[in-house]
Image (cartoon, helix red, strand yellow):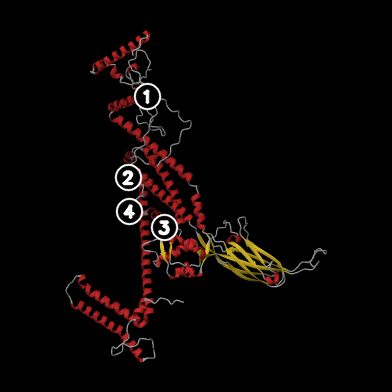
C-alpha cells in the first residue's frame, strides 16, 4: 500500500541539522536514549527562547522610542518600526509553537484560526445582509407612505368629472395591484421558502439604483406615449351636431363639429351641398372615382387588442390634473410587479425541470402469524365430514412513510410497492426444496401498486428467511466500482452526479491538457481504473459504463417463529431512507396552472382601459370648446377649412367651385393655353368622327 504524502512543513523541519554544544553536526536519527541526541534537541529548543528574547528586546526599544520621542510625527513615519516588530513577533510565535507543541499541533491550530476567520467573515456578511434588508424594508415603507399620502390628499380641481373618473381608475388599479401582490407572495413562498424576512421591496429592487428592467422605460413628464389617433367615420354635410361632452362613452372625433348648421348661402353655391356628377348645367367638373371599390366589412367586428399604452394618461391630462401622477405611480408599480411575477414564474418553470427530491424515512413492518393444525370436527360448527387443516404460517411485508406533524390530511398516500423495483423472499432451502424456496416480485409496466406483500406456507417449525428489497430510484442510480468510489468519495449516485464529481477531481488535480483542452491526462489512479494514460473528455461516459453497477439491494434477515399459536403475532420494524418528490413541486405546479385571479384581473384591466378612453374623450371635448371660447372667429374659419378637406375626400368632386364661380378665375395666364388645348382636342375629335363617317382612314 502506498504511503501518504509527507507535508512540506514536516520535511522542512526534519531537514534542519542537529548540532551539539561545540556546534558540530551529530546524527539526527530518533534515539531518545542517546545523550547526544537529547543535547541536540535542547539546543534546537533554545532557538525559540532566543527569538522570544530578541522580540521582547525589539518591543522594549520600540516602546522607549515612542515614549521618549515627543515630537509630533506623521503616522507613516513609524511604518518601518511597526513592520519590523510584527515580523519578529510572527517569527517568535511560530518558533514557540513549533518548539512547545510540535508541527502537527501547530498545523491544526493554524487551520482552526483560518476556520474561525471564515466564520467571522460569514457572520459579518450575514449581519450586512440583514442590515440591507431592514434598510430596503424601511425605504419601501416610506415610499408606500408617500403614495398613500398622495392618494388621501384632498383634491382641489375645477373639473369634477375628470376627478371622479380618475378616482375610479386609481381604485381599480389599486385592486389590481393588491391581487398581484397576493400572487407574488405565493411566488415568494414557493421559490424562496427559507427567507422569512423577504419583502416586496426587496423583490422589486433587485437592480442597482432601482433601475427598470431591460426593454422598459419609466413613466415621467418627458416619457409619454402619443395619444391614440381616432379615425372619424365618413359623414355627409348637414350631419348631427357635436356630441355632448358630458356624456361618457360618446366617441369623439378630431373635428367633432359638422358644417351642416352654418350654410349662409344657397345650397347650390356651397361646398357642403353635394351635386351629382352628371347634373346638366353644373359648373363642376366630374372626377374619376378615386376611392375604388370599398372592401366588404366583416359581419362580426374585430375586438381591439388592449395595450399597455392605452392605460397611460396623456401629458396634458397630467398637467391639468396633478393628482393623476398617483395613478401613474401605481401604473409603474404594477408594471414592475408584473415583470417580477413573470420572472418568478420562469424561475419556477426552470426549477421544475430539475429533479426535486427529499429524503424521508420508510418504516417496514415484517410480521408473521402461525396457524396450528386442526383435526376434523374439532372446531365448533365445523362440518364433521370436512378435511383437517395443516399447520401453516403467514409472512407479511408492509410499510409506510413516517409523516411529518404538519402533513396534509387530503394528501393521497403512496403505496408501499411503489418504492421498490423488485422484492425477493428467500426461505430455507432444506425445508421447502429448490423449487419452492423463492418468492419473487418484479415491477412491470402493468403492475398495480399494493400496500404490502403476503406469503403463506405450510409448516410448524421456525424458518429463517432473507428479504431482498431493491429500491426504485428515479432518476436511476448506480453503484461505482470500489476503486473509483474510493477516489471520488461517491458510493451510489446518478450518472450526472458521478460525471460531475469526476470532472471536479480532474480540475482539482489539473489533469486537463494545457494545449489540447479536450484531452485528459490520467494520473496513476485514473490510469489503473480506466486502463489508459490519455483520453478525451467525450469518452468518459463510455468508459464509465463498465464501472457502473446496479445498486445493492436492502437485505433483511428475519426468523419466522411458530410459538404462541394463532393469537401471537410477531412483528419487526426497520427504517430505511428513500427519496420522494418534494411537496413544494406540487405547489409550484398548482401555482403555474391556477387561473383563479386572471379573470378578475382582466376585468379590472378592461375597466381601466375604458376609463382612460373616456378621460381622453373628455380631454378632446375640453380642448374643442376651450379653443372655440378663446377665439370663435378663427376657430370657425379653421374648422370650415378642415371640413372642406374632409368633404372633398368623401365626395367625387374635384376642383375649387368657390373660386371657379368668380370671373377673376378665368383671367389668369394659364387660361389662354387651356383654351387652345381645348379647341385643339375638340377639332381632332370632330375630325376623327368625320373620317369614320366617310370611311377614310389615315395611313
- Separation of marks 4 and 1 at Cα, in angstroms: 58 Å
Please report whichever mark, 3 or 4, sits nearer to the chain's N-terminal start. Answer: 3
Q: Residue furthest front?
A: 699
Q: Is residue 613 above or below residue 350?
A: above
Is 268 left, or right, of 295 in this rendering?
Answer: left
- Separation of marks 2 and 1 at Cα, in angstroms: 45 Å
Of helix, strand and loop, which one carries label 4?
helix
Residue 290 disc label: 1
The image quadrant that residue 18 belongs to is bottom left
Looking at the image, which is closer to me, 174 or 541? 541
- Separation of marks 3 and 4 at Cα, in angstroms: 19 Å
Is 104 left, or right, of 552 in this rendering?
Answer: left
Disc number lying in front (3 or 4): 4
Labels 4 & 1 near each other (Cβ < 8 A): no
Please report whichever mark, 2 or 3, sits nearer to the chain's N-terminal start. Answer: 3
Kindly identify which residue carries mark 2: 220
Q: Is residue 482 above or below residue 293?
A: below
Q: Residues within 10 Å of mark 1 (few under 14, many from 20)?
A: few
Disc number lying in front (2 or 1): 1
Labels 2 & 3 near each other (Cβ < 8 A): no
Q: Residue at x 18, y 78 (%)?
A: 68
Kindly identify which residue carries mark 4: 209
Please report whichever mark, 4 or 2, sits nearer to the chain's N-terminal start. Answer: 4
Q: Residues within 10 Å of mark 2 (few under 14, many from 20)?
A: few
Looking at the image, which is closer to me, 222 or 508? 508
Residue 504 disc label: none
Amino acid at each position: 500500500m502506498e504511503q501518504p504524502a509527507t507535508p512540506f512543513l514536516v520535511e522542512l523541519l526534519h531537514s534542519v541539522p542537529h548540532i551539539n554544544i561545540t556546534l558540530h553536526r551529530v546524527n539526527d536519527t530518533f534515539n531518545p536514549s542517546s545523550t547526544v541526541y537529547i543535547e541536540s534537541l535542547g539546543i534546537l529548543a533554545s532557538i525559540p527562547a532566543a527569538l522570544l528574547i530578541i522580540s521582547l528586546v525589539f518591543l522594549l526599544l520600540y516602546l522607549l522610542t515612542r515614549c521618549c520621542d515627543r515630537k509630533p510625527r506623521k503616522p507613516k513615519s513609524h511604518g518601518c518600526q511597526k513592520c519590523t516588530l510584527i515580523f519578529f513577533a510572527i517569527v517568535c510565535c511560530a518558533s514557540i509553537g513549533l518548539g512547545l507543541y510540535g508541527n502537527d499541533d501547530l498545523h491544526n491550530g493554524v487551520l482552526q484560526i483560518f476556520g474561525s476567520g471564515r466564520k467571522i467573515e460569514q457572520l459579518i456578511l450575514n449581519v450586512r445582509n440583514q442590515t440591507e434588508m431592514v434598510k430596503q424594508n424601511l425605504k419601501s415603507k416610506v415610499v408606500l407612505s408617500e403614495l398613500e399620502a398622495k392618494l388621501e390628499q384632498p383634491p382641489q380641481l375645477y373639473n369634477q368629472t375628470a376627478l371622479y373618473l380618475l378616482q375610479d381608475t386609481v381604485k381599480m388599479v389599486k385592486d389590481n395591484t393588491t391581487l398581484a401582490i397576493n400572487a407574488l407572495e405565493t411566488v415568494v413562498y414557493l421559490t424562496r421558502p427559507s427567507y422569512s424576512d423577504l419583502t416586496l421591496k426587496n423583490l422589486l429592487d433587485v437592480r442597482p439604483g432601482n433601475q427598470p428592467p431591460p426593454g422598459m422605460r419609466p413613466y415621467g413628464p418627458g416619457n409619454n406615449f402619443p395619444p391614440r389617433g381616432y379615425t372619424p367615420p365618413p359623414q355627409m354635410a348637414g350631419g348631427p351636431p357635436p356630441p355632448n361632452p358630458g356624456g361618457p362613452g360618446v366617441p369623439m372625433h378630431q373635428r367633432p363639429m359638422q358644417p351642416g348648421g352654418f350654410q349662409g348661402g344657397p345650397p347650390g353655391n356651397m361646398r357642403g351641398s353635394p351635386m351629382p356628377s352628371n347634373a346638366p348645367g353644373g359648373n363642376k367638373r366630374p372626377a374619376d372615382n378615386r376611392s375604388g371599390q370599398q372592401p366588404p366589412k366583416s359581419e362580426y367586428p374585430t375586438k381591439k387588442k388592449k395595450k399597455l399604452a392605452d392605460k397611460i394618461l396623456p401629458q396634458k391630462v397630467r398637467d391639468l390634473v396633478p393628482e393623476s401622477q398617483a395613478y401613474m405611480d401605481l401604473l409603474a408599480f404594477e408594471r414592475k410587479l408584473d415583470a417580477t411575477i413573470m420572472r418568478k414564474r420562469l424561475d419556477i418553470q426552470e426549477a421544475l425541470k430539475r429533479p426535486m427530491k427529499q429524503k424521508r424515512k420508510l418504516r417496514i413492518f415484517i410480521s408473521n402469524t402461525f396457524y396450528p393444525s386442526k383435526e376434523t370436527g374439532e372446531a365448533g360448527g365445523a362440518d364433521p365430514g370436512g378435511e383437517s387443516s395443516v399447520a401453516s404460517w403467514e409472512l407479511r411485508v408492509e410499510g409506510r412513510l413516517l409523516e411529518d406533524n404538519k402533513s396534509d390530511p387530503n394528501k393521497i398516500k403512496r403505496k408501499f410497492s411503489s418504492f421498490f423495483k423488485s422484492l425477493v423472499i428467500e426461505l430455507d432451502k432444506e425445508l421447502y426444496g429448490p423449487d419452492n424456496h423463492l418468492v419473487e416480485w418484479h415491477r412491470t409496466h402493468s403492475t398495480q401498486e399494493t400496500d404490502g406483500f403476503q406469503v403463506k406456507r405450510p409448516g410448524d417449525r421456525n424458518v429463517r428467511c432473507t428479504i431482498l428489497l431493491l429500491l426504485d430510484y428515479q432518476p436511476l442510480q448506480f453503484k461505482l466500482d470500489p476503486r473509483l468510489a474510493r477516489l471520488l468519495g461517491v458510493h451510489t449516485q446518478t450518472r450526472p452526479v458521478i460525471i460531475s464529481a469526476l470532472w471536479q477531481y480532474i480540475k482539482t488535480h489539473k489533469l486537463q491538457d494545457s494545449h489540447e483542452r479536450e484531452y485528459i491526462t490520467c494520473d496513476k489512479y485514473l490510469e489503473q481504473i480506466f486502463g489508459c494514460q490519455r483520453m478525451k473528455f467525450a469518452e468518459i461516459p463510455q468508459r464509465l459504463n463498465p464501472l457502473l453497477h446496479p445498486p445493492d439491494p436492502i437485505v433483511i434477515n428475519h426468523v419466522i417463529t411458530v410459538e404462541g399459536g394463532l393469537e401471537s403475532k410477531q412483528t419487526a420494524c426497520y427504517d430505511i431512507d428513500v427519496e420522494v418528490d418534494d411537496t413544494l413541486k406540487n405547489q409550484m405546479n398548482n401555482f403555474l396552472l391556477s387561473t383563479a385571479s386572471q379573470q378578475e384581473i382582466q376585468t379590472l384591466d378592461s375597466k381601466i382601459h375604458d376609463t382612460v378612453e373616456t378621460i381622453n374623450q373628455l380631454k378632446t371635448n375640453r380642448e374643442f370648446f376651450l379653443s372655440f371660447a378663446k377665439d370663435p372667429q378663427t376657430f370657425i374659419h379653421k374648422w370650415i377649412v378642415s371640413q372642406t378637406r374632409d368633404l372633398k375626400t368623401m365626395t367625387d368632386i374635384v376642383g375649387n367651385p368657390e373660386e371657379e364661380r368668380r370671373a377673376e378665375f378665368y383671367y389668369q395666364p394659364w387660361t389662354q393655353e387651356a383654351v387652345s388645348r381645348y379647341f385643339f382636342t375638340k377639332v381632332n375629335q370632330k375630325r376623327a368622327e368625320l373620317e369614320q363617317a366617310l370611311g377614310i382612314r389615315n395611313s
